[in-house]
């Protein structure tokens, strides 16, 4: 982390002195989020009371974001920064430091960790380190894939934004309630669509789908990656194919940025299909809102599970 910070600050110096924090527009909050999922969930709370921008692109692995001076310029005028937490976006600290914006430093009123209150899955029971790959040392951080978490996430966002803009609390509450009403109706459809497949075995490319699968009663039995973020060995893939055949797993779930060539080969050997899901809001066409992204994912799963 120290090395990342040194590199980022050097890049900021090369870009030019950032200077004092720019004053926010009088009529709108300026909010940055680490991911597009959080951008979408923030927008349903703020409505037109804020300008919200995501730092990570929708079709990239958020673990791997490269800190650039342009991100620091984006963050320098922010009233709030909303992060995923659970060590998915540690780079956000580097951006905040390089931006020299006291509003969004860890511990500041405008720094909001959306993982607060989330029941975290896959928390390691033994010591882990980075030699084990892109491991999740404090538990799986991909909770925004689960529509059932949206209520808690939007509560955390609302309370955080109300700290810095208490005059908007009532509007934030109304906006959130309207969103949750729409989400509840959509969840009823999603449950009906996937109910016939509860208990079905599923393999994933990268360990980022456990919250979504658990929500709808699907069972993750393995990953194409032998270790997170590290290409699998041939022996691992042979074992995985055999496991899929034994458990009659018909689906491998992948993200758009996955090694789709390897995943397709495993699926072909196992007699399964690949479902490329929206790993973030906006990652595939037609998923520009949170509900649209979940809807795409549920329908894609139902299609390949038939």
Image (tube, rainbow, N blue to C red):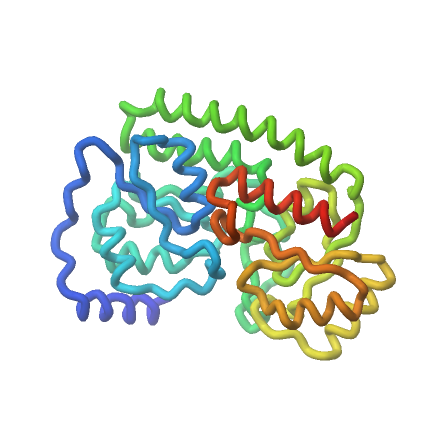
Q: Is residue 285 left or right of residue 65?
A: right
* Residue 217 position in % (x across, y down): 74, 42
Count of numbered marks: 0
Residue 116 drawn above or below residue 209: above
Q: Is residue 104 left or right of residue 124?
A: left
Q: Quadrant of residue 90?
A: bottom left
Task: Residue at 57% x, 46% y: name it.
Answer: 145
In the orientation shown, which residue stands out farthest toward the front? 285
Task: Choose between 113 and 46: the one closer to the eye.
Answer: 46
* Residue 96 position in % (x across, y down): 29, 54
Task: Residue at 36% x, 55% y: name it.
Answer: 92
Task: Residue at 47% x, 45% y: name it.
Answer: 37
* Residue 184 position in % (x across, y down): 59, 27
Q: Which quadrant does the N terminus fall into?
A: bottom left
* Residue 250 position in % (x across, y down): 78, 57
Q: Is residue 231 left or right of residue 113?
A: right
In the orientation shown, which residue stands out farthest toward the right? 246
Task: Choose between 24 and 84: the one closer to the eye.
Answer: 24
Q: Is residue 206 left or right of residue 166?
A: right
Task: Residue at 43% x, 48% y: name it.
Answer: 36
Q: Quadrant of residue 72?
A: bottom left
Task: Choose between 169 and 25: the one closer to the eye.
Answer: 25
């Amino acid at each position: 982390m120290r090395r990342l910070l040194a590199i980022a600050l050097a890049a900021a110096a090369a870009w030019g002195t950032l200077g004092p924090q720019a004053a926010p527009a009088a009529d709108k909050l300026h909010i940055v989020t680490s991911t597009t999922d959080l951008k979408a969930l923030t927008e349903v709370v703020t409505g037109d009371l804020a300008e919200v921008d995501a730092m990570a692109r929708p079709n990239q692995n958020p673990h791997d974001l490269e800190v650039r001076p342009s991100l620091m310029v984006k963050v320098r005028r922010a009233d709030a920064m909303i992060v995923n937490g659970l060590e998915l976006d540690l780079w956000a600290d580097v951006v905040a430091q390089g931006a020299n914006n006291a509003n969004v430093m860890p511990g500041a009123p405008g720094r909001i960790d959306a993982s607060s209150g989330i029941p975290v899955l896959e928390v390691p029971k033994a010591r882990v380190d980075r030699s084990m790959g892109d491991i999740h040392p404090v538990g799986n951080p991909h909770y925004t894939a689960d529509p059932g978490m949206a209520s808690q996430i939007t509560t955390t966002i609302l309370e955080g934004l109300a700290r810095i803009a208490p005059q908007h609390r009532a509007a934030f509450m109304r906006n959130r309630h309207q969103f949750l009403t729409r989400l509840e109706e959509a969840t009823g459809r999603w449950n009906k669509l996937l109910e016939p497949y509860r208990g079905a075995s599923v393999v994933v490319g990268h360990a980022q789908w456990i919250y979504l699968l658990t929500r709808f009663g699907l069972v993750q039995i393995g990953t194409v990656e032998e270790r997170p973020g590290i290409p699998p060995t041939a022996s691992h893939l042979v074992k995985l194919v055999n496991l899929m055949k034994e458990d009659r797993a018909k689906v491998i779930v992948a993200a758009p940025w996955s090694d789709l060539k390897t995943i397709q080969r495993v699926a072909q050997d196992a007699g399964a299909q690949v479902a490329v899901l929206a790993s973030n809001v906006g990652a595939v066409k037609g998923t520009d809102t949170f509900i649209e992204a979940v809807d795409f994912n549920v329908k894609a799963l139902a299609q390949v599970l038939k």
